[in-house]
Image (tube, grey):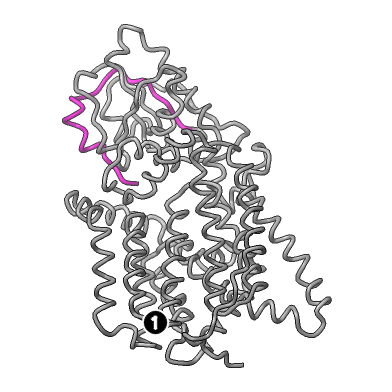
Amino acid sequence: MTVRARRAEDPLPRFAVRGVGVVVVVQTAVLTALSGRYGFHRDELYFLAAGDRLAWGYVDQPPLTPVLVRLAAELFGATEPGVRVVSTVMAAATIALVALIARELGGAGAAQTFAAFTAAVSALVLVVGHMVSTTTVDLLLWLVVALLLIRLLRTGDQRWWLAVGAAVGVALLNKWLVLLLVFAVGLALLLVGPRSVLRGRLPVAGAGVALVIAAPALVWQARHGFPLLTVAGGISADDGTENRIMFVPLQIAYLSPVLVPVWIAGMVRLWRERGPRSPRALALAYPLLVAVLLVVGGKPYYSIPLLLVLLAAGAEPTVNWLDRGRKTARRIAVSLPAVLACAGSVVVALPVLPVAVLDGPVLAMNKEQGEQVGWPEFVATVAEVWRTIPADSKETATIFTANYGQAGAIEQHGSAHGLPVPYSGHMSYADWGPPPDRRDGPVVLVGAAPGGRVASAFTGCELAAVHHTPGGVGNDEDGTAIMLCAGTTRPWSSMWPSLRHFY
């Protein structure tokens, strides 16, 4: 069946305030209740550190997420529940946006509520709703861009390009991945139309708005040699093959296998729409984006925002299907798989299980749960080594870590153990060092491989401790070696460039 494209003069259905509101309230309550479980994720620890050193950019990201984390820490406290107010609010807004997209595409109240619910129980939405990440913010901003583009296509009013440009500009202050969305949608419009929306001055003006908003972060990157591109290249080189192999399975898993028919129905529905203001290009934009990600080896979750758009588009035909024919039989047939899928998403995405049972299928599906476990104990292990340094040597002693998670954890939890501010050559921590050259005494070397390149920069290194994550959780810090070294082979300022690394 061909679906008639909506006309600008067609009134939009009323927004399902009650239905969508219930979904948002329940999800917010669940995320809030679980926000203090386990502990900070390593990225959250890094954002806290970056927020204490605000700048227009960092080597691996623009400034928006660290700014939001700094704001939350100031308002609600630098605790897990305090910081995660950001992710909870972003998740609630994401659910509302999916419902608004369903409405913009003509979905009535039931379709809007269905779209909100299916998005709310999707695995990736729950993951990024629980912990703050750049993806938490990016998911929301991509949906804002998509909603504005759909409004532009529906109305034909090119003034919406200014709003689209503003949303893209804000997204560029968070991650540059939004350029993939711009490319995919732009190419889709050229291929299947309506091409008329690309003509005139307003699309160019919208691009100008985006550049003006993002300019400070772009200038920062340019002045520092565009390190963000170096980091992105490293991700592609290191993980590209695995990303390509796992792309299709993870597209299914990140939302839920049960929801695959819904977003496929959304793609088919959009593709069949005809008319001078049809949003048909969005159906093509998703496979175009997937093709680009497969070529460059991008992470599979980069394309999930467009899948949520397709999910919103598929809400109305799915609700209509459930209401046709043998309604009771159809609803019963989908109920059990839906309940099982919802439970699976919660277990995989949220910290509901005891730490001791995380290892196995849960971490295989979502390793980020494991990265939230054991940081206070990790810092306590480092503190044990620090305490072995003679008191008269501590003024010249240093803690140096292999990665930003270790350094961020010591910054967050170290004061309780009397630990000094740590240093690291990883990501932007390299810009926040080096230690003063007068710190030429003992070095607590965290996470460096004995006999490796980093360890060779220090003298008299001996293994002092090995950290084991509580509950036997096999995360990245389980088995981390902590060495105590007598000193450095040369002044910190001299060897600092050689200690810098991005991966």
Magenta span includes 56: no
Q: Position of residue 134 (x, y in %)?
A: 42, 52
Return the residue nearer the eye: 240 or 75.
75
Q: Position of residue 297 (x, y in %)?
A: 39, 64
Is 470 placed left or right of 40 in the picture? right
Is 119 placed left or right of 184 in the picture? right
Q: Amino acid at mark 1?
A: Ala
SS at badge 1: helix
**Residue at coordinates 65% horizontally, 48% vertically from top-left?**
30
Q: Position of residue 148 (x, y in %)?
A: 42, 72
Return the residue nearer the eye: 338 or 472.
338
Q: Which residues are magenta?
A: 480-503
Residue position for label 1: 188
Q: Within the image, what quadrant is residue 483 found in?
A: top left
| Location of the N terminus (image quadrant) | bottom right
Q: Within the image, what quadrant is residue 439 found in?
A: top left
The image shows residue 49, relative to residue 380, as above or below, that is below
**Residue at coordinates 53% horizontally, 39% vertically from top-left?**
372
Q: Within the image, what quadrant is residue 46 found in?
A: top left
Magenta span includes 498: yes
